[in-house]
Amino acid sequence: MDVASILNGQWEFRVEHKGIKIFSSRVSGSEILGFKGEIELQVSLKKLLSLFYDMANFNRWVHQLVEMDVLEKSEHAEYVLRQVINTPWPLKQREVIMRSRLVSAGDNAIALTMKQEPEYLPANPKYHRVQHATGMWVFTPNGHGVVSVIFVMHLDPGKDVPAPMSNAGLFEVPFYSLNNLNSLLADTSYNPPWPEELEEYVSIIEDEPDTP
């Protein structure tokens, strides 16, 4: 996944609320729009990365997450994750299986890329297995304990969800996920453990947020 080409694509600004900016973009070969959400967080990069590896607590911030399992943990801080996402009745819940990798995103930036692996497990008739999903999170420290966060995703929920319906709810996922993320990181009682496996791939000089 080419991080630079995706971030520099043709994004259309749609809305800004609570410091969160949402953009959309057409995706070749799909009627489903891609989205991009942006926010600046008062947090150390180390705590932010720790949150993304604190998978037991993903349900506290990932929008409409019902279930999550780690199916595989490989070298190079690579994971295969299974997520079940809630959907309005009478639609089946969406089951998404993605491989996540930690990569460089240019000077001073880190990205977590996500790519679908729908054949990783046999299909479960209880859920609708998502066949097309790709995305990334990009973290760029800006100094004084501020990290710029970009969340990019294109997910086709399936033919039983009309494209206009899917696109109408486009902004919920990035907005609520980023807003929940911000709230959780601001909770002083939440201290996710630092994943030791990242020591081999990430060198962080602590830059704590400014205090009022």
Image: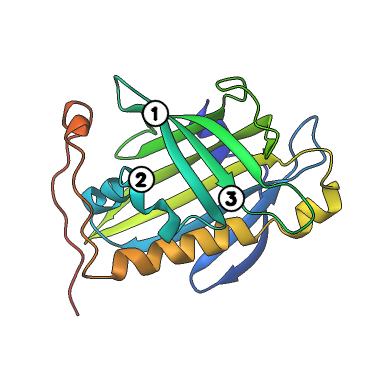
Can you identify the residue that label 1 sits on? 79
Task: Please rate how many residues cluster around mark 2, counting C-alpha atoms within 10 Å: few if below 14, some from 14 to 19, many from 20.
Answer: some
State the image coordinates of residue 170 (x, y, percent, origin top left): 69, 55
Task: Name the outermost residue toward the bottom.
Answer: 212
Q: CA distance from mark 1 to mark 3?
A: 23 Å
The structure residue drawn at horizontal position 65% and vertical position 31%, both measured from the top left corner, is 124
User: Reading the chain from its start, which is encountered first: label 1 or label 3?
Assistant: 3
State the image coordinates of residue 45 (x, y, percent, origin top left): 25, 50
Residue closest to the eye, 167 or 157: 157
Relative placement, left or right, of 49 versus 72 is left
User: Reading the chain from its start, which is encountered first: label 1 or label 2?
Assistant: 2
Can you identify the residue that label 3 sits on? 36
Q: Say which quarter of the image contains residue 171.
A: bottom right
Q: Amino acid at mark 2?
A: Met
Task: Please rate how many residues cluster around mark 3, counting C-alpha atoms within 10 Å: few if below 14, some from 14 to 19, many from 20.
Answer: many
The structure residue drawn at horizontal position 24% and vertical position 63%, both measured from the top left corner, is 190
Relative vertical location of residue 134 with respect to residue 164 in this rendering, above or below: above
Q: Amino acid at mark 1?
A: Tyr
Task: Please rate how many residues cluster around mark 1, counting C-alpha atoms within 10 Å: few if below 14, some from 14 to 19, many from 20.
Answer: some
Can you identify the residue that label 2 sits on? 55
Q: Say which quarter of the image contains residue 94.
A: top right
User: Reading the chain from its start, which is encountered first: label 3 or label 2?
Assistant: 3
Q: In front of the other: label 1 or label 3? A: 1
Q: CA distance from mark 1 to mark 2?
A: 11 Å
Q: Amino acid at mark 3?
A: Lys
State the image coordinates of residue 192 (x, y, percent, origin top left): 23, 53
State the image coordinates of residue 140 (x, y, percent, origin top left): 35, 47
Q: Secondary structure at mark 1?
A: strand
